[in-house]
Image (cartoon, coloured by chain):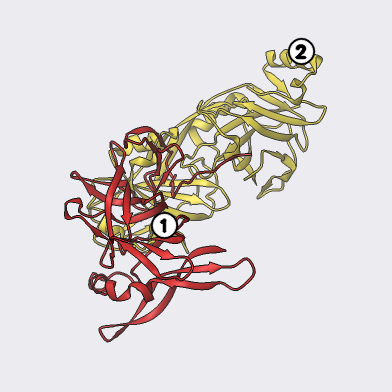
Amino acid sequence: MTYLLGHETYEADVDGESIAMVSDTVIALPVDGEPVEIWSARESLWDDLYPVILQMLEQGQERPLDWTHGTTIAFDERNDRLLVTLTKANSVVGINRLTGVTSWVLGGNASTLTVGVEQGTLVAVPHSIQALDGSVLLFNQQFDRDGEHCGEATEVALDVPDSSASLAWWGREPDCGAPDIMGSAYRMLDGGTLMAGGTLGRLSWLDTQGEQVWRLEAELGTTFGGTSHVADFH
Amino acid sequence: MWRTSTDRGRGLALLALVAAAACGERPHDSADDVLRLVGDGGSCGLTATLGVSSQVVDPGVDVRISWEDLTLDLLGLPLAEVQQLRLWAFSGLGEAELAAGLVAGSIEQSSVLTQYTCQPQAQACSFSELEVFGHDYDVRDDFGVLDATWLITLHGADRRGLQAVGFIQPGSGELASLDDQSGSMSLELTLAPALAVAQGSGPSLDWSGLDTDAQGHPLSAYRLDMLGLFHLPVAIDQLEATLREQGLADASAWWLDVAGRDDASLEELQGEQGFGGIDDQGTWLLALFESSGVSPLPRVLVVLAPQ
């Protein structure tokens, strides 16, 4: 089975007005068979995010209103969940792969996981997610920490039965920037983290302490949307 | 450096090669009629001075960027169809540094604060038509707000690469117009020995062994995606002055899209005039371009010596 991040467009009633909307779906695509929608943000998150939708409309954001803006989907094999980043909702979502039921939401108005007040937010314009053992690694494209606004690799430990989450690790470049578009973080087999800097045109390797080991500065016109591990080249 | 297929084990041919090089002309292997470009490919050295004009436009209005009066690209060749306009905001680089950096290929993406694009329907784009990777961000939220140097670049269809440049600054005015005076480029050529080729349809080319460009930078041959052949009505001893003063304005040009390839036959070239083969009149230049780059210069430029 293949799972795809899709989107749907529709008209929705907002305070008595019909508004053109677009939001994300997860599609199951069998090898032999028709694609089936197993999850949609409209059905799962509408009520919780309704105040955010109103705010976006007040800001005059373009129609159809893209109120979730899904950017990545990943598979959490240990827990048989699909993980989705919803960039505009400032949320990441864990979805039961078999039932399509939302297992947890981290960040934003719909969050089902509680984060200690002292930790602040853990999700800020997320653009990638990777399932790790007991945690997820996010690329937060626009993260404020220690007075710096940057793209950041943020590892969040999840305790779903306890409905809680906490900061496990973070790393960013020494002279970091926040890309306009895209970007990703990927934990490699040796524990290092490879960050793609989106429109900054950078690739950075961070060690387990979050220290930058090396960085590639690409030439003008280059954008690194995402990175992942390839086992072998032949 | 370059080599022919005879390099691979034919001692006598190698001797002939050395002798010919000493005469200033280097033959290709006539055995299989393939000109193999290796190393820097025997490329001439090539740099340029790029002059770019700056215009003042109002950050509060829907500025129209027009190139209706633009007829030539930066090399002096007829303007290609413009496929994309890009508007870049650079941090920490002034206009002079940017112009020099474009030619030298030394600007890094991380100096870009933001970049907008437009796929023009006509010979103009307005601020309201610009987008960022499909997102309808309003450039007026940035222009006049960011501490940046703003550069317009026009990119040609069919892999013709960078065609024109211009700077804009916030001020007053509703139109930015790119014409043949907006950007001017003076080419500085360091002549290398011409590569001998047979008159007529010319050899096949194999550039898989290239690893250095005309500016001495490392080069990946697979990134070369456009082959150009130019015929100038001047003797080779006038070539440097001609390119410095007027670029390729008097050249006949033939092109071939070579994306994904590392070899080609000159017989595949296309131009406004049909390609009738290479003769011993004037000067013939062979160029390989990387159209995805943001430099107006070819990565490799070889002078041919038809025999």
Residue at 50%, 54% in the rendered image: B82
Residue at 29%, 69% in the rendered image: A61
Of residue A222 and residue B82, the one placed in the foreground of this image is: A222
Of residue A228 and residue B39, the one placed in the foreground of this image is: A228
Image colour assigned to chain B: yellow
Residue at 39%, 72% in the rendered image: A22
Residue furthest bottom as drawn: A16
Of residue A154 and residue B153, the one placed in the foreground of this image is: A154
Check disc 2: other Cα within 10 Å, few if <14, some if 14-19, many if 20+: few
Marks 2 and 1: CB-CB under 8 Å? no
Q: Quadrant of residue B264?
A: top right
**Three-letter code, disc 2:** Leu
| Horizontal relation, residue B56 to residue B42: left or right | left
**Three-letter code, disc 1:** Phe
Where does label 2 land, which residue? B15
| Horizontal relation, residue B72 to residue B231: left or right | left
Q: Is residue A56 visible?
A: yes
Residue furthest front as drawn: A161
The quarter in which the N terminus of chain A is drawn is: bottom right
Image colour assigned to chain A: red
Provide the secondary structure element on which disc 2 rests. Answer: helix
User: Disc 2: which chain?
Assistant: B
Q: Quadrant of residue A56?
A: bottom left
Q: Which circle's residue, 2 or 1, is located before the other in the chain?
A: 2
Q: Position of residue B148 (x, y in %)?
A: 27, 45
Where does label 1 land, which residue? B133
Q: CA distance from mark 2 to mark 1?
A: 55 Å
| Horizontal relation, residue B268 to residue A81: left or right | right
